[in-house]
Image: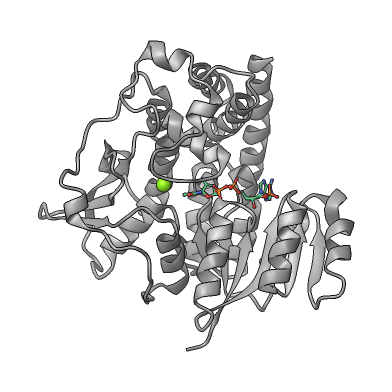
Amino acid sequence: MTKKRIAILGSTGSIGTQALEVIEKNQSHFELEVITAQSNADLLIKQAIKHKPNTVVIGDDKQYLKVSDALEKFDIKVFGGSKSISQVVEMETVDIVLIAVVGFAGLEPTINAIKAKKHIALANKETLVVAGDLISKLSKENKTNIIPVDSEHSAIFQCLAGEGINPIEKIYLTASGGPFRGKDFNFLKTVTKTQALKHPNWKMGAKITIDSASMMNKGLEVIEAKWLFDLDNKQIDVIVHPQSIIHSIVQFCDGSMKAQMGLPDMKLPIQYAFSFPQRIKTDFPRFNFLNYPELTFEAPDMKNFRNLALAFEAVRYGGNIPCILNAANEIVVDAFLNNKIEFLKMPDVIEKCMQTIKFINDPSYEDLINSNNESRKLALSYIK
Ligand code: NDP
Ligand code: MG
C-alpha cells in the first residue's frame, strides 16, 4: 500500500496534536508532509523537529524568523503568513489535508484544497456552517471526498458505509449536554469561563469547549450535518446523551436505526478520516458494557441554551444567516474567554446580528466574506 501523505493545518491544536499521534503510530500507512500553526511557534518548532515534515508554515508573519532560524539545520521548508497556509495545501506531495484550524480561518484553505483535488479530512465545522452550499458544490465539481472528523459526523458517515442508494430518513446527533446540562437560568447567569472550560467527556480547544457549554457546538453541527449528508432541516434531530458513548444515529426508511458507538476518543475519527475506506487496528481501550449499565437520553433544553434554537433558525433561513451566526459567535466566545461578556448574553448578541445584517439568499464567496466581517463588527459594537 502506498503511504498517504498528510498536511495538518492547525497541528498545534487539540485535533492537530492528536493527528500527529495517529500518524506517528501508523508510519506504514501515513507520512507527514506539512504542519501549520497560527502563533504557537515554540510548539510548532518542537513538532517539526520531532516529526520531520517537509514543510512548516507559521501563520503569524512576525514569528517567521524565529521558526526558520530554529529549523535552519534541518531539511524542512519554512513559510510564513496566512496566505501560505492556504497555498501549501496545493502542493503536489500532499494527498490528504486535515483542516484542524479553528473558526472562519478554515474556509480559504479548504476551498483551495478542494480545488487542488485533495482528499479533505474536515475537523473545522465552521467552514461548512459559513459556506456549506459553496463547499458542497465545489467538492462535487472537483470530485473530492470530504471525510468528517467531528465525532458525530464521523459516526453518521460510518453508519452510511455500505448503504449505497438507501436514503436517510433522519439523523440523530448526540450531545453530551456539556458542563451545564440541567442547569437553570439563574445558575447560567453567573457561570464563569473556568466553569465553562471544564467539559465532562472531551478535552478540546478553548473555542469549541465554550461552544459545547453553550450548546452552540451542537447548533454548528446541525448545519454541518445538513451539508455533509445533503439533508433537509427536518431530517436532523438532537438528542442529549450525557455518557458520549453513542456518537450519533442514522434512521433509514424502514425504521431501522444504526448507531456508531465507542469510548470517546477523537483519535478514532481522525484515523478513520485518514484511512477510509480501510480501518486500521488500534490499541485504544475497548468499551465495556458492564461499566456503562445505563446509557441515557433526554431532550435538549433550547429555552436556557438559546444558541441551539438560533442555529436551527439559521439553518431554516439559510443564505448568509449561518455565516452571520458563526461570525457573531466567534466574537462573543472570544469576549467570554476574556471576561467581557456574560454567558447568557452571548445568544442575545448573536440573535441581534442575525436580525440586523442584510439577508442574502444565495451568497457568493465575496458576500460571505462581507457578511462575516459585518457580523464581527456589529457583534463587537454590542459588546463594547
Ligand atoms: P485548538 O484551538 O486547539 O487549535 C486550533 C489550531 O488552529 C491551532 O493549531 C492554532 O494555531 C490554529 N489556528 C488558530 N487560529 C488560526 C488562524 N486564524 N489561521 C490559521 N490557523 C489558526 O482547536 P481544536 O483542535 O479544538 O479545534 C479545531 C477545529 O476542529 C475546530 O473547528 C473545532 O470545532 C473542530 N473540532 C474539534 C474537536 C476537538 O476535540 N478538539 C472535535 C470536533 C471538531 P496556534 O496554536 O498557533 O494558535
Ligand atoms: Mg462534535
**6 sits to left or right of 92:** left
**41 sits to left or right of 104:** right
Q: Nearer the viewer, residue 34 or 129?
A: 34
Height in image: 50 above or below 242? below
Name the residue: 63% across, 58% down. 11
Name the residue: 23% across, 54% down. 168
Height in image: 193 above or below 106? above
The C terminus, quarter of image: top right
Residue 84 screen position, x and y as percent: 76, 60
Residue 90 seen in render: no
- State which quadrant residue 194 falls in: top right
Residue 152 seen in render: yes
Residue at the limit of the structure toward the top, as seen here: 186
Height in image: 19 above or below 304? below
Residue 28 screen position, x and y as percent: 51, 84
Name the residue: 62% across, 67% down. 7
Name the residue: 72% across, 67% down. 48
Residue 299 screen position, x and y as percent: 24, 30
Q: Nearer the viewer, residue 132 or 297?
A: 297
Residue 186 screen position, x and y as percent: 40, 10
**90 sits to left or right of 96:** right
Residue at the limit of the structure toward the bottom, as seen here: 1
Height in image: 311 above or below 105? above
- State which quadrant residue 181 falls in: top left
